[in-house]
Image: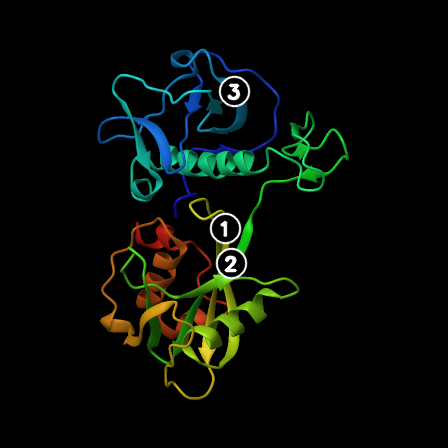
Amino acid sequence: MLQEIAPLLFDNGFRVCTPEDQDLALVCDAEGVLLKEGETLELPRAGDIPDAAYTYLFAVGGKTVFLAQTDNPVVLPGYAYKPLSQLRRAQPKAIAFAAATGHQLYRWYLRRRFCGVCGTPTQPSAKERSLVCPNCGNTEYPSIMPAVIVGIVDGDRLLMTKYANRPFANWALVAGYAEIGEALEETVRRETMEEVGLLLGKIVYYRSQPWPFSGSLLMGFYAQLDGSDDISLNDGELAEAAWLHQNEIDIPFEDVSLTNEMICRFHWEGRRVLDTDRDPRPLREILL
């Protein structure tokens, strides 16, 4: 998946430091990230943007990445802003992951400039990744929204869905955000009922994935259908839902998203995805 960049390491430990000229600079706008033009992703260097205010973000593959913020839009010869939507399958994957994750933090910093309690401008903490109000002491941490992805299984069939009113028109799975006071297993059952009107029996946790494009922490589950297989599109979020036999699924493994991996895993293993003693390795280690 996108975050799996081994043998490179992602180090998100908090630091307070200033950049060297060769450190990577992440420059963002509302929709994307400044990258060198060409087929291979490349971030600018801090030395290219000397007048920016820098915030340390993380290290990827031993290279430190700083958020660079300026009063005016940054214009560099040979660089252009690339929309986040183009990063999902871009290479190298480590830079795509760094750019998307950095943009998630950029959005958080932008939206938490003022205290949500008293309205005072916030200040970065010197001991952890947080923003602190110097007036009332309110502390804000990066926003991470928990969400579930559900692979609903009926024998050798998997329930596949397509979203309504979205540019993404490929096959997907039932998905949705957890609500306040709700366990994730309850989210799985509620979202399934709301989107396709189906009841579930056994629920098995699969894997999780940080998804910086929406600021989510995705948690994947496979679930056994319990009762009728009649689909009812209830809430307007889906344009289509259909049962596909294991052998009818013809989707290439992209090694990017949890949804894609779960669909391909069912194509590979069928109903065995519901077994708790199945092969625990990530699918990329099996197929690639």
The residue at the point 27 percent across, 60 percent down is: 170
Relative to 160, does residue 211 appear above or below in the rendering? above
Q: Residue furthest front?
A: 119
Residue 171 image point, x, y percent = 29, 64
Mark 1 and mark 3 in contact (Cβ < 8 Å)? no
Considering depth in this image, is 126 or 53 the residue closer to the camera? 53
The residue at the point 52 percent across, 18 percent down is: 53
Instruction: Determine if residue 78 is in view.
Output: yes
Residue 14 vs residue 39: left or right? right
Considering depth in this image, is 96 or 82 the residue closer to the camera? 82
Mark 1 surroundings within 10 Å by alpha-carbon count, few (fewer than 14), some (14 through 19), many (20 or more): some
Query: From mark 3 to mark 2, how far is it between C-alphas?
Result: 31 Å
Q: Residue furthest bottom?
A: 228
| Three-letter code, disc 2 | Ala
| Dot 2: element | strand
Q: Which residue is mark 1?
A: 216
Mark 2 and mark 1 in contact (Cβ < 8 Å)? yes
| Three-letter code, disc 3 | Tyr
Query: From mark 3 to mark 1, how far is it between C-alphas?
Result: 25 Å
Q: Which residue is mark 3?
A: 54
Q: Which residue is mark 2?
A: 147
The first of marks 3 and 1 along the sequence is 3
Considering depth in this image, is 42 or 11 the residue closer to the camera? 42
Mark 3 surroundings within 10 Å by alpha-carbon count, few (fewer than 14), some (14 through 19), many (20 or more): many
